[in-house]
Amino acid sequence: MKVALFVTCLNDTMYPGTGKATVALLRRLGVEVEFPMAQTCCGQMHVNSGYVPEAIPVVRTFVEAFAGYDAVVTPSGSCAASARHQHKIVAQRSGDPALVRAVEAISPRVYELSEFLVDVLGVVDVGAYFPHRVTLHPSCHSTRLLGVGDRCQRLLQAVRGITMVDLPDAEECCGFGGTFSLKNPDVSVAMGSDKARHVRESGAEVLVAGDNSCLMHIGGLLTRQQAGIRVMHMAEILAAQEAVA
Amino acid sequence: MMSNTATFIGMPPFPIAARKALADSQLRGNIRNATHTIRAKRAHVCGELDDFEQLRQAGADIKDDVLRNLGRYLEQVEESLTAAGATVHWARDGAEANKIVVDIARRHRVDEVVKVKSMATQEIELNAALEAAGIAAWETDLAELIVQLGHDLPSHILVPAIHRNRSEVREIFLREMGKVGMPAEDDLSDDPAELAGAARRHLREKFLRAKVAVSGANFLVAETGTLVVVESEGNGRMCLTLPEVLISVVGIEKVVPTWTDLEVFLQLLPRSATGERMNPYTSTWTGVTPGDGPQEVHVVLLDNGRTKVLSDEVGRQALRCIRCSACINVCPVYERTGGHAYGSVYPGPIGAILTPMLRGVGADEQTDSLPFASTLCGACYEVCPVLINIPEVLVHLREKVVDSHRGGVPGALQAAMTGASWTFGNSTRLGVLQKLAGLSSAVIGRRGLIGRMPAPLSRWTDARDLPAPPRESFRRWWARTDAGRRDTGGHPQNTRKGLDDK
C-alpha cells in the first residue's frame, strides 16, 4: 500500500512536531509513509470564506501531489473533511472534467489519522506510553463531518500509563471556526473561554485533539490565562514511548 | 393604544451587535439556562423514537416535493379554501400583505385585533402597519406579550422572550399592563403561575372583546384547504374561535399535500421545538363552518422573497424549515449572543441563511454579516428535523456575499485570500513564505509565543496567544533529514512551540 502524508499547511508551517510524530507513529506500525513535496493546503480556508474560485488552484495542487497513492493520511479532521466533501464542489466549479475525475479518485482515499489507524490498519493499541492526565476535545469536523465517533478516544484509552478524564460539554464547538476567529473575535473568544474553563475543570494536565487549529485557539487562551495546561495533538501522544533513545 | 412598535431596521452588523450582547451577563445567563434545558428535552424525546431518522427524511422529502411542485399545490390550496368558504388573497411582499390585512380590518371598522403568535406577520412587521392605520394589534402568546409590553424585539423563533427571566417579566407586567388594558395586581410576585395568571386576566378581556383575529399557520393542507396552528398555551385557540373575522397570513412554503403528510410533521415539530411528545393545542380549521367559529375567513398567501429563495438551487432547502428552533437551541454562537444580534425576526443558524436570502445579499452590511456568524460546527444540521444542511448554505451564501463585492478595491481579507491562493497553488512559494515566517519569529516571538500585536492581528492576540512560527517547517525538516531518517533531534512530543520548546 502506497501511503502519503498530507501534513496540512498549518502543521507544515506552525506545528512540524505533529507531522514528525505522525511519521514516527506510522513507521512504528510498519507503514513507510511518503511526503509528496508538491503538497500545500486543502483549500478549506478559501471555500469557507466564500472564495471558491481562489480554491481551484489549491485543489489542483492537492490532486497532483497525491495522484497515485492508495491512501492519504492527515493529522487533521477538518482538512480531511475538506478533501472528502468540499473538493468535489470546487472541482465542479472549475468546469474542468479532468479535475473532477482526479478529485473523485482521491477524495475517498483521504483519511483522518484516527480513521486510518482504526479502519485501515485495524489497530487500537499503537504501543504508546504517556503517563499523564489527558482530556480529549473531539473537534466538530471530526465528529460531525467525518463521523469518527469514538476512534480517538479508543486510541488514547489504549495508551499505557494514560489517565483519560471527561471534558464537560466535550462536543460543543471551541469557537475557532477558521476566519470566524478573526471576523467575529469576540464571540470566538467567548466560546473558547467556556471551552478553556471546561478543560480546567476536567482536571487534565494535557488537552488533546485531532486538529491543531482548535488547539491553537484553545491553547492560546490557556497560555494567556497561565492555566498550566499543555495542548498536544493526538499524533504526538500516540507517538510517545517509554524509553527515549 | 400601544406605542413605538420596535423594529430591527438600523441594527449594526453581527460582530458589533454581538459585542454588546456578550457583555450582558443577565442575557448570557438567561439564554444559557433556557437553551440547555430545551436542548436536553429535545435530545431525550427525539432519541426515544426508533424511526426518528426516517421521520426526518420523510419531512425533507415531503417539503421538497411541495417546493418542486409549488405552483400546482398553491392552485389546489386556493381551490380547496375557496370551496370551503374562505377568501384567498395573494401578496407579493410584506407591503401588499399588510395592506390586505389593514383593509379588511378597516372594512369591519375595528380599532384593534388579537393575534396568534406568527412568524410571517413578524417578518412583514404587520403590527407597525396596523398601528399606522390606527389599529392596535394585541399579541396573545405569552412570550410575544412580554416582548410587546416591553417595547422589545423577539430574540427567538419559538420563545421570543427567551432573553428575559421571570423577575424582568414581573417588572414589565407591573409597569406596562395597566397602560393598555387590565393591570397586573400590585402585589404580583415573580412566581411563574402568578405571572401566567396576570397574563390570562389581561388577555381574556381582549379575547372577549375582539371582532377580528390575525394568525399565521404552521401548515396548510392542500387537499382540504385546512390551516393548522400548533401551540402550547391555548391563546391561539381563543383567537381562532371567538372573533367573527379571522385573517391568516401564511408563507407559500407552508403547504403540505395531504393529512397523511401532516402526520409526519406533527411528530417532528413538537419533539424538535419544545422537546414534547405532543404539543398541548393543535387547532385545525377549514374555511367557514356555519354557526361555529369565525364566519368570515381570509387567507393571505405570502411570497415576500420566498420565490427568490426557491430559485437558489443550494439555498432553497431553507424553505423546508418548520420554524421549530432546534438549530437555534443547539447553536453555540446563539447561546452567547442571543437573538437580537442577528438583527432579524429569524435569529440563529436558520436566520443566518434565511434572512439574507429573503432580503437578498449584497444590499447592506448587516445582512451580509449574517452568513459569517457561524463557526460551521454543524450542530444545527445534526438536529434539523427536515435535514436542512445549514453549514452548506452558509458557505454558499458567503460566496455570494464575496462575489457581490468583487470588482471594487479589494479589502484586506480579499487581498489575503488572493495572496493565499497564489501561495498555496505552488509548494515552492509556500516554502519561501515558511522561511520568512520562521525568520520573523526570532524577532517577534518570546518563549515561542507571540503576545499582543497591532491590528489586524490584534483580533487574534487581544485575548489569545499565538505560537511563534518554528525556525524549520515540516517540509524543510523532511528534506534536511532524509525523511526523518537522519534526524538526531529529540522526542517527537518535545516539539510543540510555546509549551515545551527548548
Image (cartoon, coloured by chain):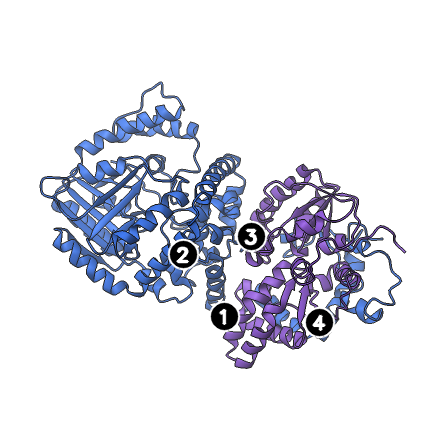
SS at mark 4 in the image: loop
Disc nearest the viewer among 4 and 2: 4
Q: Residue at x 74, y 59 (%)?
A: A18
Q: Amino acid at mark 1?
A: Arg
Would you place residue A190 above or below residue B395 in this image?
above
Q: Quadrant of the N terminus of chain B?
A: top left
Mark 2 or mark 1, which has the lower sequence index? 2
Residue position marked by numbered label 3 in the rendering: A184
Chain letter of disc 1 in the image = B
Residue position marked by numbered label 1 in the rendering: B406
Residue position marked by numbered label 2 in the rendering: B57
Q: Position of residue A129 (x, y in %)?
A: 80, 49
Q: What shade has chain A been given?
A: purple
**Both labels 1 and 4 in a single chain:** no
Disc nearest the viewer among 1 and 4: 4
Chain letter of disc 4 in the image = A
Q: Is residue B385 left or right of residue B467?
A: left
Q: What shade has chain B been given?
A: blue
Would you place residue A48 above or below residue B54 in this image?
below
SS at mark 1 in the image: loop
Q: Position of residue B387 (x, y in %)?
A: 43, 56
Tell me the tag on residue A235.
none
